[in-house]
Image (cartoon, rainbow, N blue to C red):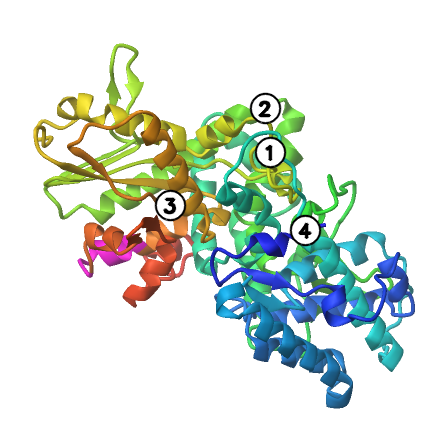
Amino acid sequence: MKKRKDLLRDKDNFIHIVEFKEIFPHEQLPANRLELIKTIPKNTLVWIFSHLNKLLKSPVDLNYDMTLEKQIELLKYLCNGNKEMARPYILAMGRIYGKVRAPKNSTGIPMFISRVLCLHALQEIVLDYNGKYQEIYTLTDDDILNLLKYIACVNEHIAVYKKRHKQQLTFHEELLSAGIVLNEPLITVMPFKIFNWYMKLIEFFQSDSRISQHIADYFKHIGFTPQQFLHLIGTMYLEDRGNYNTNRHTRDDVDGSFTHMFEFMSKNINIRQRHELDIIPIRKYPIYKIKESDRQYIILDFVLLLEKMYEMFINDFYFDWLKAKDFMFDEYMGIVGKFFEGYCSKILNRMFEWSDSKIQCTSENKIYVGKNEDELCDVYYREGKNILFGEMKATGIYSSHREGFTDSMFGEDKEKFYKSIGLNQLIKNIRRLHEYGEQIDEDFPTGSNTVVYPILILNEKYYRATYVPVALQERIIAEFEKEKLPSNIIVRPITVIHISDLEAMEEMIHKRKITIWELLKRNYIKNPQKPNPISFTMERTRIPPTPVSEDFMEWLGLKEK
């Protein structure tokens, strides 16, 4: 069977999952991987994998350490510092690294121990492993060997590339779909951005008459105020920074609020996997309670803990509260979409507030054209002959999209997917731009070349993956080949922008450190024209973004209004 890693060869930042046969070439794959670790106490296993997770990226690091040096360090750690015991695995990793990273045959960055592994192993151990509890336990040499084999088995499980085609897909469309299992967990955003999004989301929910009472009742039901919820998670996230010795929490809190939060985050009840690669249980409950111990907990994954304030909060508020109140999901997602568009529109307006040029955003100035009064776009900004033209979508990614098949993101209707992220609308409206340009912009440059820079502003961090803009650009090219544009409309490669990237762009452009056009021109390869992730391009500018907004500091009471 082909492996998913064989598909991931488009960019060198993909991970190449090191599997059983690569690290144990002369042994058979065990039939039951949990049998390998049956002698190790459950609490010890949970602590080991949560600690490995933290060693790959501490709470204050932005990115995961995917170097060979880190893999060697982790192998030594698993072998209790015994270099001789670790030697054969270190040598194997060196051979794999040399083979996989060869310029003509690169399939990514080899990782035996990764966050992807840790998440799947932790979830399996928490849900399905019935091991004993033992407060103090030292791994034997046999335990270590079996633990390494277990890791290799989990890697084998998550790396299988499952081919399934209900419709014709391009290579990069397959990559977009199958790559989510291995690559989404490695895509990060600045932690303080999530605090800010949470604060703005709650304010928006409180201001919407349809759900304002629901949000108040929900927080009362779970036993926190909105500010407490943020404060407790933020404290839990940051208090262990730099401390690599322990990931256990035995807090003595006077009012019991921290204990209540640890209990709330570790319920782990009535939720199971929807498919074999589904990690919704650990995403929903990112803390493990050691039941045999007195108030002792382990944070399984610090990033998942933070996501409880934004991505998973949006999910939890509906499925844990609104659904039982017969609130329709589509109406709820419409509210979330309205929040997202309004939030992004304010960023865009601040970005260009010094400019005399025309800026249009959905939440403030909707643009309708034609007999049916269709909305033309969410974003329109022009300077001279250059036009920024785009759509904003808060479309979510759900468990069914994460099955790992080459068509999981598309289901049976590829058109529905492209519509959900705004790409179909963007293509349609670029075609109509020459017809309605003067209607929306009296100075629209008719009769001469007009350069359009198409953008999609999206809410899911997975769309920051390197291959996403390439897949979408191929779709745009294919559509424009079917129906040619007027010769005076020149369309540059698409730029896919996550909300965190948009905030970073605001800092750069508002302070005039770089123009929007300079940034977008740097964001694609000239020949052939191929888009890069905007985050890569911004990193190369070496202009650091502001980590915390002033209104967020005001909301916490740390800055006077």
- The answer to which image quadrant residue 448 occupies is top left
- Which of discs 2 and 4 lies nearer the camera? The answer is 4
State the image coordinates of residue 555 (x, y, percent, origin top left).
Answer: 41, 52
Tell us which disc is closer to us: 3 or 2: 3
Q: CA distance from mark 3 to mark 1?
A: 27 Å
Q: Pointer 2: residues within 10 angstroms few (<14), some, or many (20+)?
A: some
Give the mark nearer the N terminus: 2 vs 1.
1
Residue 514 horizontal/vertical position (percent): 20, 58
Q: Position of residue 13 (x, y in %)?
A: 49, 62
Q: Which residues are magenta?
A: 505-513
Q: Judge whether residue 411 is colored magenta.
A: no
Residue type highlighted by circle 1: Tyr
Tell me, for residue 2, which label it has, or none: 4
Which secondary structure type mostly characterizes the magenta part of the structure?
A: helix
Question: Relative to 133, is 188 on the left or the right?
Answer: left
Q: Is residue 497 above or below residue 558?
A: above
Q: Is residue 526 left or right of residue 51?
A: left
Of tags 1 and 4, the one toward the viewer is: 4
Distance from disc 1 to disc 4, alpha carbons, whole Å, reads 38 Å
Question: 84 or 479: nearer the eye?
Answer: 479
Q: Secondary structure at mark 4?
A: loop
Residue at 72 percent of width and 85 percent of height: 87
For mark 1, what is the residue? 318
